[in-house]
Amino acid sequence: MKLRKFNYYAFMGVLAYIIYSIITYEEYTWPYNSDSPFFYNYALTVCSLMVFMYFLLPGTRKPFFDSRVRWWEPMKRYNVLLPCFLSRGDLTFTGRILNISKSGVFIEDSVHVKVGDTLKMNLNIFGQNLDVTLEVMNKHTIKGQAGFGAKFRLEDWMQNFKVRSVIRKIKNAQGTEKPALQET
């Protein structure tokens, strides 16, 4: 089951119903047929109340309402061939982005890059200039192409907005059956 707003409300609704059913218990009604609920039902209600209160905490609610927090769900990646400029300290070199998502990029391998490096990336796409910081997470091969995976280190909401805007434009440009986006 995926963490979505609907699931949060459905789960909290079931917990609220369990608590409500014990509070409004009527003697000798189904399913208990006794003058009070069984001990098991009280224990279940106390556990439900504790879980209910836990899920009211902001940190627990966040994955349901903010997709960026759900690191275990992979972001949709878009295959592209986009030239970019990368820099580390005084060294500036060119690279080619092979795929991109909201969380990061996969760039053609370079001898200037090793895992753990922090790079500055400059990308000009759709008339928009995107300057972001990258953290190199790994080096591997995808479909026979060696490269490195880098995670975006977005410094403010404006960078986040720009990255999402670029991803949205790439998604719209590619559609569902168009070939990979290329810029020269």
Image (tube, grey):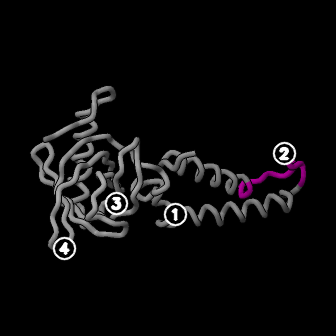
Point out which mark residue 37 bears. none
Q: Nearer the viewer, mark 1 or mark 3?
A: 3
* Residue 26 place in picture, x, y as percent: 79, 51
> In terms of depth relative to the viewer, which is nearer, 128 or 97?
97
Residue projecting furthest to the right: 34
Residue indicated by mark 1: 60
Residue stretch rendered in magenta on the structure: 22-34
Q: Are marks 3 and 4 in contact (CB under 8 Å)?
A: no
Residue indicated by mark 3: 151
Q: Amino acid at mark 3?
A: Lys
Secondary structure of the residue carrying tag 4 is loop
Q: Are marks 3 and 2 in contact (CB under 8 Å)?
A: no
Residue in the image at 16% along x and 69% along y = 91
* Residue 150 place in picture, x, y as percent: 33, 59
**Can residue 158 be seen in this snapshot?**
no
Residue 31 falls inside the magenta stretch: yes
Pointer 4: residues within 10 angstroms few (<14), some, or many (20+)? few
Q: CA distance from mark 1 to mark 3?
A: 24 Å
Q: Nearer the viewer, mark 2 or mark 1?
A: 1
Q: CA distance from mark 2 to mark 1?
A: 33 Å
Residue indicated by mark 2: 31
Left or right: where 56 falls relative to 117: right
